[in-house]
């Protein structure tokens, strides 16, 4: 038999049966299909359910998930349940501006220096924190997974090029860079997001690459190559599913970094002035010198940030334990 | 494991049939560069150094036969196996599959080659993707090569599993971590066979398995080779298993063959001092038997700086003056039994006879 030319490859199936003495036996189709069908049907969500099952075993992760779920529900319902527009100036019965009013039945979280409802701002701040955190994490996760996968899998000059780029990116100091960039681009939510993504893809790319490098050395990758699998197939089918937990862990961490960075930028006055983000609230409290006196203005955004970030870390830690068996204390 | 083969049983028949070699390599070399990179290139003086993992090997494996490849760790036997299935690019020499040159094919040609030449790795625990069921793993090669529709693939996978004695009903939907080592290696073999290859490299397929199940895997290999007409290159450092399944055997040392021939002939009458030392190290299952110990001094030299003349001279118990000056040529000591050693050249006075070691 001679090796087949390109035009014949499409007919591989026919050639296969002609060439080989052992052709496939059509009479067994029904039986074989039955055996195939008899398997445990595994939904595409199985890994998610599995992961969730492991997370609920960790008490801190349950607390974290509960906090995040609560915040998410309040955030989603936000526009429906906020009592007042966040920038509506409130007046006392005598007609004066209701500045820095302490919490009362009418205004449970009090009012700020500009006579705005703190509760409304806090609830709408949840939306901004989630928006920033999730979109930054998705973008960062996507960029770092693709770059890390390509860099680690192909190696060589491509790897060198990407990794030197990461080195350069890693040498940029986080906050000064963010301040300068936002100052130059102008303070808006999209610019803040852009800067956050620019800052956090770098670590992710390196982390995913290191995971790819270990996966690449496993014998089933060489076996797949020997079977004729394409680079694309090996990357997406054999390596990617095995590095996804690592990428996902980094995405979780990115949510926390992104929320913190947005809050930091807002606090120093580089946030979007049209949005009531938590950082922005703290910034105004600081600027109006009320940060020591108006505790009802300062506490909600601070506690919100602490709760959200630590909840993310609790979940991330539990998830890391799942993906890194050496950290797993109890037997599964 | 003891030998099962009656003396002289297959030698004559095999020679009479003499099937065409399914895979053949001539003057095959694989050198790996040692210090790569820009800085190494700037700092280095002289030509770049290389590890000469395979340094000129002629090998041919017939269909329906198992060819044994024996040597110490690091002698290049796994590299040879991986080069023959084109997982490494050969540095020099030529490879033929069924007479067709495949040394440098690429693209679609290589894809066709991959369907016909397969490899089984040593580690059955790592050779299967932990996220694929046995069925998915065995089906994958068919998908890669676009063979059959859903129904045909289902049948082929089931048949392949049956062939390696894994009940499809029980194993198709299992994950690798639910299988024992032997079952995994069977699954790997099923994945290999589903493409109906002509040539398979079995790279120490049983060295990580329990002793109790090794024979089963070896019997399976032999059965498949005979039934499916496979040519198998069986790489091992365990001479007893080589004797159990192999028709022919080659002894490898530092990137080259030093001796090859029919298995029984080579094992019973080892000619090369290195082979003699290897054989002397094999335990004999007889407490009354006395045997001569041949100890090899020192370590295998680095394959970066290979000794001049005969490669084995630095450790050879019978080293002579000529050994460091002249590389010994191939000699036929018995019909079909070849060796590279100056001891067997008529112009050289042998210091020891071949059979003495046994």
Image: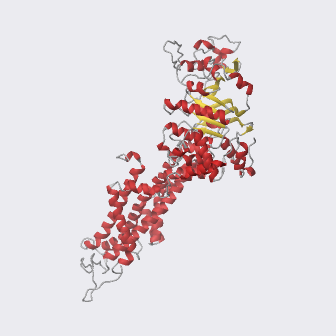
Work out whether residue A332 or residue A306 is closer to the camera in this orientation and state it: A332
Q: Could you tell me which quadrant the N terminus of chain A lies in?
A: top right
Instruction: Give me the residue at 49% from left, 46% from top.
Output: B175
Is residue A163 visible in this depiction of the protein?
no
Residue A317 horizontal/vertical position (percent): 37, 54
Q: Is residue B296 above or below residue B229?
A: above
Instruction: Give me the residue at 68% from left, 22% from top.
Output: B11
Work out whether residue B179 or residue A55 is closer to the camera in this orientation and state it: B179
Instruction: Give me the residue at 45% from left, 62% from top.
Output: A137
Work out whether residue A269 or residue B323 is closer to the camera in this orientation and state it: B323
Residue B204 horizontal/vertical position (percent): 56, 32
User: In this image, B247 relative to A221: left or right?
Assistant: right
Residue B234 horizontal/vertical position (percent): 61, 31
Instruction: Give me the residue at 65% from left, 26% from top.
Output: B247
Number of dots carrying numbers? 0
Residue A195 horizontal/vertical position (percent): 46, 65
User: Residue A22, located in which quarter of the rendered image?
Assistant: top right
Q: Is residue B32 above or below residue A229?
A: above
Name the residue furthest bottom.
A94
Work out whether residue A91 or residue B280 is closer to the camera in this orientation and state it: B280
Q: Is residue B96 above or below residue B271?
A: below
In the rendered view, how is the structure colored?
secondary structure
User: Residue B303, located in which quarter of the rendered image?
Assistant: top right
Is residue A136 visible in this depiction of the protein?
yes
């Amino acid at each position: 038999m001679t090796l087949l030319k390109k035009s014949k490859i499409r007919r591989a199936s026919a050639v296969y049966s002609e060439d080989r003495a052992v052709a496939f036996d059509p009479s067994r189709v029904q039986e074989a299909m039955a055996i195939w069908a008899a398997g445990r049907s595994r939904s595409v969500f199985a890994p998610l359910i599995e992961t969730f099952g492991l997370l609920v075993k960790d008490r801190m992760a349950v607390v974290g998930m509960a906090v995040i779920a609560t915040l998410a529900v309040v955030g989603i319902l936000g526009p429906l349940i906020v009592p007042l527009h966040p920038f509506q100036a409130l007046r006392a019965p005598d007609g004066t501006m209701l500045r820095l009013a302490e919490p009362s039945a009418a205004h449970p979280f009090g009012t700020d220096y500009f006579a705005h409802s703190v509760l409304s701002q806090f609830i709408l701040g949840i939306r901004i924190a989630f928006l920033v955190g999730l979109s930054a994490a998705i973008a960062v996760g996507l960029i770092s997974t693709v770059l890390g996968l390509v860099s680690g899998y192909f190696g060589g000059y491509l790897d060198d090029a990407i990794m030197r780029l990461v080195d350069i990116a890693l040498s940029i100091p986080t906050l000064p860079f963010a301040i300068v960039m936002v100052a130059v681009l102008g303070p808006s939510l999209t610019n803040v997001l852009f800067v956050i993504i620019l800052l956090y893809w770098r670590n992710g790319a390196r982390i995913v690459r290191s995971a790819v490098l270990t996966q690449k050395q496993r014998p089933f990758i060489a076996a797949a190559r020997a079977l004729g699998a394409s680079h694309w197939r090996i990357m997406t089918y054999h390596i990617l599913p095995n590095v996804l937990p690592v990428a996902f862990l980094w995405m979780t961490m990115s949510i926390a970094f992104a929320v913190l960075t947005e809050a930091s930028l807002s606090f120093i006055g580089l946030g979007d002035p049209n949005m009531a983000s938590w950082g922005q609230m703290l910034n105004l409290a600081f600027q109006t010198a009320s940060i020591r006196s108006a505790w009802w203005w300062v506490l909600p955004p601070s506690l919100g940030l602490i709760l959200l970030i630590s909840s993310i870390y609790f979940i991330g830690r539990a998830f890391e334990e799942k993906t890194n068996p050496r950290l797993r204390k109890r037997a599964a | 494991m003891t030998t099962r083969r009656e003396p002289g049983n297959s030698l004559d028949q095999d020679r009479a049939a003499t099937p065409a070699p399914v895979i053949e390599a001539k003057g095959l070399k694989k050198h790996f560069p040692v210090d790569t990179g820009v800085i190494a290139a700037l700092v280095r003086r002289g030509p770049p150094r290389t590890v000469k993992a395979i340094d000129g090997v002629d090998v041919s494996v017939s269909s329906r036969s198992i060819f044994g490849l024996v040597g110490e760790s690091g002698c290049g036997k796994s590299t040879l196996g991986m080069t023959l299935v084109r997982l490494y690019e050969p540095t020099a020499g030529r490879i033929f599959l069924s007479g067709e040159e495949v040394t440098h094919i690429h693209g679609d040609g290589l894809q066709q080659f991959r369907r016909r030449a397969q490899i089984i790795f040593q580690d059955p625990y790592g050779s299967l993707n932990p996220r694929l069921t046995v069925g998915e793993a065995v089906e994958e090669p068919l998908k890669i090569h676009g063979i059959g529709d859903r129904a045909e693939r289902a049948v082929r996978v089931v048949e392949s599993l049956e062939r390696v004695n894994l009940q499809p009903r029980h194993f198709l939907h299992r994950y690798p971590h639910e299988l024992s080592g032997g079952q995994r290696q069977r699954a790997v073999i099923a994945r290999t066979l589903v493409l109906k290859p002509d040539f398979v490299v079995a790279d120490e397929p049983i060295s990580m398995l329990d002793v109790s199940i090794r024979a089963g895997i070896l019997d399976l290999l032999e059965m498949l080779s005979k039934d499916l007409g496979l040519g198998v290159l069986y790489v091992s450092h365990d001479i007893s298993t080589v004797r159990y399944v192999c028709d022919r055997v080659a002894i490898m040392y530092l990137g080259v063959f030093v001796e090859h021939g029919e298995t029984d002939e080579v094992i019973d009458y080892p000619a090369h001092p290195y082979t003699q030392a290897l054989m002397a190290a094999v335990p004999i299952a007889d407490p009354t038997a006395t045997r001569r110990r041949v100890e090899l001094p020192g370590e295998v030299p680095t394959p970066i700086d290979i000794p001049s003349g005969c490669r084995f001279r630095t450790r050879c118990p019978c080293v002579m003056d000529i050994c460091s000056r002249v590389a010994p040529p191939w000699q036929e000591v018995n019909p079909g039994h070849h060796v590279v050693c100056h001891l067997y050249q008529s112009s050289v006075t042998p210091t020891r006879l071949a059979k003495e070691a046994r």
